[in-house]
Amino acid sequence: MTGENLVTAPKNSYPPGDLAIWFFILAELTAFFALFATYAVSYRIHYPLFAAMQPTLDARWGAVNTVLLLLGSWGVARAVVAAKAASPQEGRRSSTWLLLGVACGFLFLVSKGFEYAAKFRAGIDLDTNLFFTFYFSLTAFHAMHVLLGVVILAIVAVKARHGSYHRDATVGIETAASYWHMVDLVWLILFPLLYLLTIPV
Amino acid sequence: MEDPAAAKRRRLIDVTALILLVATVGAAALSEWGRQQVAGERLSYFLLLLAVGKGLAVVDVFMDLRPVVWRWRGLLWTWVVGAVAICGALILG
């Protein structure tokens, strides 16, 4: 073995967690890409409507949503590191970090509820126009993934509390973390497409 | 004794999270400013570039795909760059 081999980080053949989750993640990303592309094509076709409607969305709500998901992802990533460094006796450490992810996901759903409520009070719903059909469809479809992520993280947190994850057993927590980061990743692209672009009519 | 590799990864995660949070707040503030100033498309391109950077950081650091062979990391990089480039070109083009 050469000195270079000793200092170079090893390349893994497979991503973290169960390999099956990565095929699921790729399928989900494909579905979201199709939705994003449909939104973008509709934006181009119905440009005046979309450009006029987009500023009516409150970017501050979108920013709050993004901050919550990023904080959740931070907690989940730290949970995986904690599990990987823990001996079988110290396996509970990751549970607290996972609960941060659960809390952030829950708060994301609550903030989405407030955002939707404000729209409904203003008389805006799925049928208002094509832009809001996309707005509600994209965000609700994503929120369903967040809800599933919260459930998965809560189950994994309970298992972590019982010491199920440690340096010799990380597949479960890595699988859950990979799903959660996918949910975060999708939102990071959805956020600017839906809330942030500033195009004059 | 603390594992140096774990400590390094923890620091990387913390710093990345902090940068992503600052970038998010900055992007929202820029967007609000852009709407008032009618700054137009250039700002939108910048916001999309920022989204690409944030997405790649999530893939590499949070998902921990940096040490993974390129066929997996590359698929996710392609999704991030491709989704933003195609949608951005359709919307702004």
Image: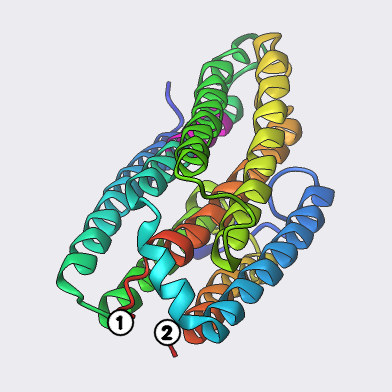
Q: Earlier in the sequence, mark 1 or mark 2?
A: 1
For disc 2, the marked residue is B92
The residue closer to the viewer here, B26 or A41, is A41
Relative to A47, say whether A165 is above or below.
Answer: above
Q: How is the image coloured?
A: rainbow
The amino acid type, in three-letter code, at marker 1 is Glu
- What kind of secondary structure does the magenta stretch mostly adopt? helix
For disc 1, the marked residue is B41
Q: Quadrant of residue A83?
A: top right
Relative to B48, say whether A150 is above or below.
Answer: above
User: Can residue A125 be seen at all in this image of the molecule?
Assistant: yes
Distance between the Cα atoms at labels 1 and 2? 7 Å
Relative to A111, say whether A145 is above or below.
Answer: below
| Marks 1 and 2 in Cβ contact (< 8 Å) | yes
Same chain, marks 1 and 2? yes
Relative to A162, say whether A36 is above or below.
Answer: below
Q: Quadrant of the N terminus of chain A?
A: bottom right
The residue segment tinted magenta is: A71-80
Residue at the image position 43 percent from the left and 35 percent from the top:
A71
User: Can residue A8 be seen at all in this image of the molecule?
Assistant: no
> Residue A142 at x, y = what percent?
63, 49
Q: Residue furthest right?
A: A20
Q: Quadrant of residue A180?
A: top right
Residue at the image position 58 percent from the left and 17 percent from the top:
A95
Q: Chain of mark 1?
A: B
Assess disc 1: are there few (<14), some (14-19) or many (≥20) residues with their C-alpha within 10 Å of its C-alpha: some
Q: Is residue A43 left or right of residue A33?
A: left
